Image: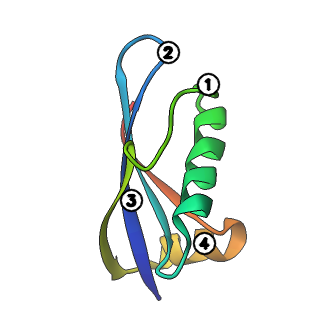
Amino acid sequence: MKVAVYDTHVLKKDGGTLHFDVIVPQAESQERVLGFGREHLKTVGQEGQTLTDKECEFCHVEPAAAEIEQAIHQRGYYIQELSH
């Protein structure tokens, strides 16, 4: 499975930066990618923070590792945390 990686940087409520990748099937729409990013923000206590295509940019396409592919089949996306 080929996946698209969206590099995401969100300003946290405390002024820091949250950095993560939203990884989705290659053909997924930007609108759904942003929705997945917003779902993730809720799970880490950052609900309501700005998340647009400026904070969540397409980066590249790559083959999915087994763990990522499994998560995509279950939830539709995978989040790779890069910094908290």
22 in relation to 65, above or below: above
* Residue ID for mark 2: 13
Please tell me whether mark 1 or mark 2 is closer to you in this view. 2
**Kind of residue sitting beneath label 4:** Ile
Percent of width and height locating residue 9: 36, 38
33 in relation to 81, above or below: below
* Residue ID for mark 3: 6
Residue found at the very far bottom of the displayed protein: 1
Q: Secondary structure at mark 1?
A: loop
The residue at the point 58 percent across, 31 percent down is 44
Q: Are marks 3 and 4 in contact (CB under 8 Å)?
A: no
Q: CA gap, disc 2 to disc 4? A: 28 Å
Horizontal side, residue 74 vs residue 21: left or right = right
Percent of width and height locating residue 69: 53, 77
The residue at the point 52 percent across, 63 percent down is 30
Earlier-in-chain disc, 2 versus 3: 3
- Place residue 15 in its image quadrant: top left
**Kind of residue sitting beneath label 1:** Gly
